Amino acid sequence: MTWTTQQIAELTGGQLRGPGDVSVGGIDTLETAAPNQLTFIGDAKYARKWPQSKAVAALVARKVEMPQDGARPIIAVDNVDIAVAKVLEAMAPPPTQPEPGVHPTAFVDPSATLGDDVRIGPHVVVGPNVTIGDRAVLHPNVTVLADSAVGADSVMWPGVVIRERCTIGQRCIFHPNVTIGADGFGYRPDPGGRGIVKIPQIGTVEIGNDVELGAGSCVDRGKFGPTVVGDMCKVDNLVQIAHNCRVGRCVIIAGKAGLAGSVTVGDGVVIGGGALLKDHITVGDGATIAGQAAVMTDVPSGGTWVGYPAKDARIAGREYAAIAKLPDVLKQMKKILREDR
Amino acid sequence: MTWTTQQIAELTGGQLRGPGDVSVGGIDTLETAAPNQLTFIGDAKYARKWPQSKAVAALVARKVEMPQDGARPIIAVDNVDIAVAKVLEAMAPPPTQPEPGVHPTAFVDPSATLGDDVRIGPHVVVGPNVTIGDRAVLHPNVTVLADSAVGADSVMWPGVVIRERCTIGQRCIFHPNVTIGADGFGYRPDPGGRGIVKIPQIGTVEIGNDVELGAGSCVDRGKFGPTVVGDMCKVDNLVQIAHNCRVGRCVIIAGKAGLAGSVTVGDGVVIGGGALLKDHITVGDGATIAGQAAVMTDVPSGGTWVGYPAKDARIAGREYAAIAKLPDVLKQMKKILREDR
Amino acid sequence: MTWTTQQIAELTGGQLRGPGDVSVGGIDTLETAAPNQLTFIGDAKYARKWPQSKAVAALVARKVEMPQDGARPIIAVDNVDIAVAKVLEAMAPPPTQPEPGVHPTAFVDPSATLGDDVRIGPHVVVGPNVTIGDRAVLHPNVTVLADSAVGADSVMWPGVVIRERCTIGQRCIFHPNVTIGADGFGYRPDPGGRGIVKIPQIGTVEIGNDVELGAGSCVDRGKFGPTVVGDMCKVDNLVQIAHNCRVGRCVIIAGKAGLAGSVTVGDGVVIGGGALLKDHITVGDGATIAGQAAVMTDVPSGGTWVGYPAKDARIAGREYAAIAKLPDVLKQMKKILREDR
């Protein structure tokens, strides 16, 4: 499938400079675009690479001055990221999904309720009293256990496991091998002092609408009450959300991050890759946690927390700068201390 | 299902203050308990939230003085955590499990041996010469490959994979998407100098009794000999235990921690979330590793190790305190150094 | 199965000292070898443990002087690691694999193309237009979605998920629950300011030949264009490789490491366990990233980067040494500052 530069200008609301009938068959970066592909330049520092790029046309931020180039069309846009996103939406191939209905190799318990136009792939297992919403898609080898519900228009990729009594909202996307509702991690000393005994985790999981969970990520069930992930949260791969966490709306959690038990996260929080949050802490609305931070205390709304142990970014920044100077300072110190004696 | 406050007092061994015929339909925190639910107060600082809580009754630590409250019953207990655990045990719903026997969609190799009263769910695969113990439960989409054994009363949740020649003890619980027996990570330089060549990992995995492994966690097979996880170990989600590790009894490993190859961990060790242990180190009995620590050396028995790189907590604590003062100290230093010249 | 010490000497190219007809039934470490097993000594410091070892014979590095020992044979070799690898290759049991052909419980779309001598296990799902190369092995419960290809002689262990339009090379090994081709993690602000909107991830994944991926690891599909993992890369468990990364040849990535979006990694790079690489950075050929490093900047070819934030190992090493002295230095400082006033 191809688009003309004119069509690209229209769908991005951009201003076309150059011919409008040039054919575009995809999009990629300046370095990797093929000769029939569109590319994009969001910052002046990349403009100088344009002459060497094989791309046939470019989306360019309005503020960027472009080097002279004979023939190739330029489409000037206000925001390159959004323009690229719109192009990707137009170019996206139709979704891969199982055939409509229930595949003959799937096992759906007779007590389950299936909505209209569901697509349930090969070897899916749907347990007793499960509800699958209208148009929901369960890819091959998905498992949904008893009394759980998957909302309308949600898509569960292969290997997703949803344990019993969990609720998934509408328009959610769970990537392969996500686990919902595993037991929270709770034990108590054996009364005889001979070991440790499991505490039953009798709670549930409640996932809101429009939530996306990355491959291999886990949301554990509550010890009591639900573990909650709010509407529109976007969670990357291999993230753990432990029992009884309460994650607000529009929270972004990058890959390999982890929330220990009973963490409360406000709306609009951004958590960087690999960051870990200690149990029972609260992160205020709109806060930012840096990648790989070890957060051991509450984080105020709007705060930015960095480091191990994590602190306000301004404090941590001063400390990191001071540490970088430390070896030289110690050398000078040593001299002074020697003279001092 | 509901319980009376009298019944709660009996099952927790607590002292009831107030009416014994109040009906309780669940348990939750002070903030989130519904009007028919029990709550709990383990520390005096939470007692002031009791008047605002909607809970109908509370388990309270004996030492906590409670504000006056007209009607709602209080149950005084020695240890709130244990009392809550006992309540959860009483309130736990019956376990979700497949029907007794082998589901018609499961594939069990004819050479496998199944114990009495096993429950093998839809689309399970049991390979040649596998042994499944009495009353063991294999949830949907579990795979057990050739010559492995799962002990009596163990529960494998959906998506668990046990590769060949691995042994799982009795009463184990493996959460969804656990992997047992993947090849250890071992390579050698290609003799022609053109790359790297896989070293066969011909060992096995031996998991003791009463071991719990969290969702997505992995225990790799030994290069030679077994990787061992001892009785009663409790392992959280997304944990890696690499080839030839030897983990003792009653070890607790929190989420996202990792043990590199040939790590030896003593009995009763506690490893915090995200901590990583370098290959070939030894952690002594009863040691504690802090969350996100990077442990690069042996840890003595009973030690507490913190930080990156991890050190004895007392040393690390002094260093963190010193770093926090460093920016101000450097400012003062600069002044002195200037005067000095 | 057993081998004679003479046979071990021949297959390792070693020099036998002592009897050649001693029977060897396996290999293990000095401490754990059984009385019929071979062991190995690569360093002089372990030689003193030889008298106590139960092993019946030992591979020993030529440079190591061995304590006198009456009878047990010693095989002197240039490189113990390579000798052990050769022994393991000889001792490796035949691979566990499904029966040849397509298991009757597998679902293979009629439009898929299967090579010669494939082995497709129970409950595997192969989607439309998929190509499976000659002699490839799909273990139970593997899923390969539409238009993807798995190269000849590749082995996919149970629970592996390969999403649509991804390409896997020849002789690859993917361990259980690996995910290939999940959507990259990309969003844009909702134009109405009410939240965040998914950016379609229309790219693919291209995995080279001889690549090994550990259990639970994930390689996300590109936003546009492919995410690339080069020939002979070896990746451990629970590793994330995000969208549009380009990983060179012979890269070794230890467990729990993570590459954020659009990271470029050169040939022969070694990335330690738990290290995280920030998006859009470049790591030059032959660089080494230490375990748990937080890499936030480009790393030059051949560099060794350590720490949080990661720096050249020489600089980081000086800083860590300085920090270790800091508490004592501050004490001295305090004294001087007091005297100064």
Image: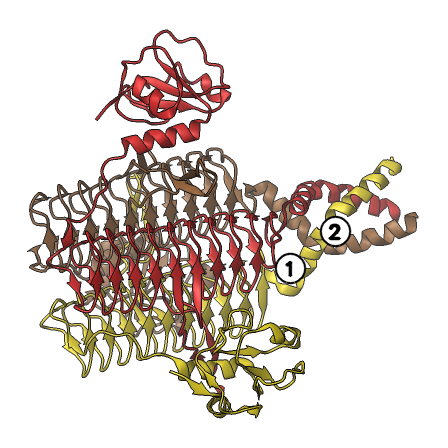
Chain colours: A brown, B red, C yellow
Q: Residue at x 32, y 63 (%)?
A: C178
Q: Quadrant of residue A247?
A: top left
Residue A275 in picture, x, y percent from top left? 47, 48
Instruction: Between label 1 and label 2, give the one nearer the viewer.
Output: 2
For disc 2, the neighbor class at 10 Å (few under 14, some 14 to 19, many from 20) is: some
Q: What residue is disc 1 on?
A: C316
Q: Nearer the viewer, residue A269 or C307?
A: C307
Residue C127 in picture, x, y percent from top left? 16, 67
Q: Identify the subunit bearing mark 1.
A: C
Q: Quadrant of the N terminus of chain A?
A: bottom left
Callout 2 amino acid:
Lys
Q: Quadrant of residue C72?
A: bottom right
Do we see residue A176 in this rendering? yes
Residue B254 in picture, x, y percent from top left? 45, 48
Residue C182 in picture, x, y percent from top left? 29, 59
Secondary structure under tag 2 reads helix
Is B268 rendered above or below residue B281?
above
Is C156 rendered above or below residue B189?
above
Q: Quadrant of residue B169?
A: bottom left
Q: What residue is disc 2 on?
A: C325
* Disc on the earlier residue, 1 or 2: 1
Q: Nearer the viewer, residue B33 or A135?
A: B33
Q: Is residue C179 left or right of residue A93?
A: right
Q: Is residue B91 left or right of residue B252?
A: left
Q: Residue furthest front?
A: C70
Q: Identify the subunit bearing mark 2.
A: C
Callout 1 amino acid:
Ala
Q: Is there one chain holding both mark 1 and mark 2? A: yes
For disc 1, the neighbor class at 10 Å (few under 14, some 14 to 19, many from 20) is: many
